[in-house]
Image (cartoon, rainbow, N blue to C red):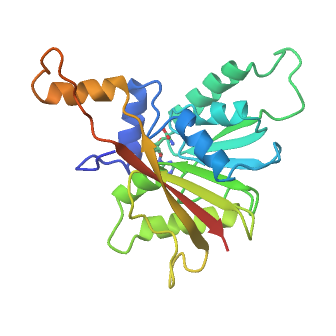
Amino acid sequence: MVSGATPFDKQEYWSQRFDREASFEWLMPWTVLGPHLLALDLLPRDPSARILNLGCGNSDLPLDLYRAGYQHVTSVDFVGSVVNRMRERCERAIGWPSSPSSPSARECPLQFLEMDCLDMSALPQGSFQLCVDKSTSDAISCGDDDECTKLKTLCEQVARVVVQPGGLWCVISYSRFRQYEWTEGLGQGLWRTERIEEVKVEQTRQQQQRIDNAGTQPEAGHTVHAPDVFMYLYINRRL
Ligand SMILES: C[S@@+](CC[C@H](N)C(=O)[O-])C[C@H]1O[C@@H](n2cnc3c(N)ncnc32)[C@H](O)[C@@H]1O
């Protein structure tokens, strides 16, 4: 994501975008993220663990987590239309409910809620073992002030809903300079950033093509070398 003047922090921007775009995966797909989470032992061993997906957008992440075996994945986003579309899309994809005439007493493993991540007071305290945030901190930070008031508020909000101590907040960001540990004021003493992992993301053919087209067309027999792209995985542990 290149911030520029694009209002990534604004609900209106996302709402209009989702009216035009059915599906988009920010920063990296599960085929890249999943193996990193697994290798770093960040995925709960218990399939009944509760997972919170912050700012779900129209990405496949809820389905990916379900296919990885998780039975309680709650996705939130502040755009109601995308939340409703995602609920329909994911329920269809997993065949829920198995019989429409006899709805299961059990709740759907994939829950979708319209909610501002900066006010998650409707979620029960200490209820999630893992919070996954794929570029939602990035979006929120785009509209932040010099004191990082919004990011600190997010730190407070996520801290309330994950288990304490030990709950995990895994952030996937394009930025190497996000801060989740604060020593005074808002957000202080809530998180320890245990590790920041660099994740190499292969360029897709489409991205490669865009680079090719930005310059002159390569002559036959010439290879275009696209630079490696790196994202960052922040492993934040609730104190
Ligand atoms: C960069 S997109 C990432 C979407 C998705 N996580 C992915 O990986 O493709 C940021 C998402 O966060 C949502 N968002 C931004 N600010 C938010 C806020 N304050 N509360 C809830 N959702 C927010 C946007 O609607 C958008 O879906």
Can I make out residue 168 in this image? Answer: yes
What x and y, as percent, mark residue 83? 57, 35
Task: Say above or below: 107 vs 157.
Answer: above
Seen in the image, is 122 located left or right of residue 206?
right
Residue nearest the observer in this picture, 96 or 189: 189
Give the residue displayed 51% in from the left and 34% down from the top.
29
* Whole-percent x, y for residue 209 in the image: 26, 24
Quadrant hosting residue 91: top right
Q: 68 or 21: nearer the eye? A: 68
Query: Can you see residue 114?
Result: no
Residue 98: percent from the left, percent from the top? 82, 18
Figure disc tally: 0
Residue at the farthest left position: 216
Q: Quadrant of the N terminus?
A: top left
| Image quadrant in which the C terminus is located | bottom right
In the current view of this chain or complex, which residue is farthest to the front?
A: 221
Q: Residue at x 56, y 27 (%)?
A: 85
| 93 lies left or right of 137 | right
Query: In the image, is 5 to the left or to the right of 234?
Result: left
Point 41% across, 27% down: residue = 19
Q: Position of residue 174 (x, y in %)?
A: 39, 51
- Left/right placement of residue 1 relative to residue 182 reads left
Residue at 51%, 69% in the rendered image: 180
Q: Quadrant of residue 62?
A: top right
Q: Nearer the viewer, residue 181 or 91?
A: 181
